[in-house]
Image (cartoon, rainbow, N blue to C red):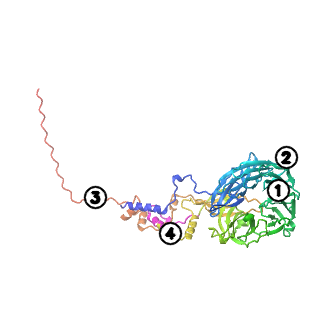
Amino acid sequence: RAVKAPMSGVAFALLALAPPALFEDQAGKFDWARENVGSVGAAVFRSVGSQRLAVVASEAAVAGIDLRTGGTAWRRVLPEGESVGGLLALGSSGVLSTGVAHRDGRAHGSVRLFSDSGALLWDAVLDAVGDAAAPPVTAATDVAIYAASATSVLALHAATGKELWRWTAPADKAGLRVAALVPQGGEVRAYGVLDGRLAVATLGASDGAPASKGVELIKGEALLGGAPLVAVPDGSRLVSLSADKAKLVVHAVGSGKAEAHPLAALLPAGAAAEALSPTPLPGGALLSLAGGGSAVIALGKGSAPARLAKHVAPAAAGGAQALAAAEWKEGGALLALARAEAGALTLQTCELAADGAACEWSAAEPLGEADGELGAGFAAWVGPYARKDGSTGARLLVRSAGDALALHVRAAAAAAEGGKGEGGRLWVREEALASVSGAELLPLPAIAIDRGAAEQRPFFGFAFPAVADGIKSRLEALQRSAAEAEAEAKRLLLLGDAYGSRQVVVAATAASKLFGLHSSTGAVLWSRHVPPLAPGAPPPLLRGRPCPRPASPPLRRQDLLRRRPAQPPLPRAARRLLRGSPPPPRLCWALLLPRCRRPPRPPQLLRPPSPARPPRPPPPPSPPPPSPPP
């Protein structure tokens, strides 16, 4: 019984302390892994039953992000050599992705249809797109999906992806590059730029047969080369920029001419157009201005002149802004303006009607804090939704300059959305970790040890202080609140262990961002974004090397034995044992040491020994046997 008591104490100590160890079946397996998408270039908002998703696309992957948690609901990595250029929501059918596939040394257009659960329904490869390698242009109806690549137009079945028909521009119109598709009635109009002029080919929606006129040139101003041709959502008009960027060219679909609206009469004094945004607006167009800023142009009804609906001034120094639009009620759209200035992110919204009528902009509402990454520039996508009171809510998906993807809502609605972030930020994903270019391991600060105890001789047999410490730590953990427990867990996470297994992985990424990751859990401890040296310049290439450390003397065996966690002062009997003096008998059963044994006692005689008896005399010799008769 005296031997079993210490062994049970040691077993209890092992259960209470749970020391770190590595089992044989754990060797060679992942401790943790992170699933990233990459730098997001396109996003659409989807609803699947009670689940809300943001389907995002990077250059090499398409993924569905849960809007409540920010986790990856599904992810599809494209084959090598393919990239995604845009996403198109197709109602209940799913999400259509367009991109470029490099095969046989040539660039081909690719189209893929994904369901809301991430399943690939079908895909198709188009003709070569030429040197520009631009993604194909698409348009959809309930029956077919039309895709244009370079000089050809392809019709695909909406449910199966089967090719229905194909049209290619005639040889004398080989310079045509289809840039917009407008399905209307039983026809599909393919618009492009030919010799600097707007051209159109009218095709049959059922068989792709061209009209008798073939490719027809539209009368009007010369167009800017490379400028997008943007069709309004209802397909009634087509908008582009003139070659000198001084006029907005508007073509009424079905007519033979294009009208030019001088921008000098529409924009504020001193403002000049820089580019036309490919974002379609109902009854309007979105322009990017030189020197920063944007302008929303409302196209008049019928013969009414165009006018300026909204002018967005350039952001202040050290700030940034972005305009986003999404389809909304009855063919209209929700226009959102996000600003990152003075350390805060704000949002203004405006509901555009289907005819492009003017709307009232809401007051700027806070969406949380804005760090330096947002101030260096960001992209945004807006997702409108109907609230219970009938008003319109907005979710804002933001990609920062350091490729951090975050979801923001109005601060008043953050609690209702279940967010745990700062202000109106529900979650954030560090997508720059998808492009790690190098990593280094650095040790964490070690846990303080008892220096006084380190001067003593090592002692490994006293288990009861460890048991007491384990029980005490468990009781203290039960008494802490949730916030205190989380703070304590974060504090212990930043401390090393006696075995050196907890370290910091310092990772450099292609997005010009440094990360500090915990080697045990993969949690992001810190991140630093290094902006480019000049606006528009490529991000700097980050390379790291370990800093030189002062040379340290070689460790001795006694130094390694002294590195142990702090222990309470030893009892007097234990100190006597360390000095070499024999311990008391009771301590022998508490210390599991071979040297701690009771000395053998001399035999004790209970009664005096009896006197020795004399030896018995030997028996007399026996007579010889008689001899046999002769």
Relative to 172, residue 519 above or below: below
Crowding near the residue tagged with mark 1, few <14, some 14–19, many ≥20 C-alpha atoms within 10 Å: few
Rendering coords of residue 271 (x, y %)? 84, 67
Q: Nearer the viewer, mark 1 or mark 3?
A: 1
Residue on which the image places disc 2 = 171
Which sits earlier in the primary sequence, circle 4 or circle 2?
2
Q: Quadrant of the C terminus?
A: top left
| Mark carried by residue 478 | 4
| Rendering quarter of residue 396 | bottom right
Which residues are drawn in magenta? 445-470
The amino acid sitting under disc 2 is: Ala
Quadrant holding the N terminus: bottom left
Label 2 to label 1: alpha-carbon separation:
22 Å
Q: Earlier in the sequence, mark 1 or mark 4?
A: 1
Please provide percent x and percent y for residue 599.
Answer: 34, 60
Image quadrant assignment for residue 279: bottom right
Q: Nearer the viewer, mark 4 or mark 3?
A: 4
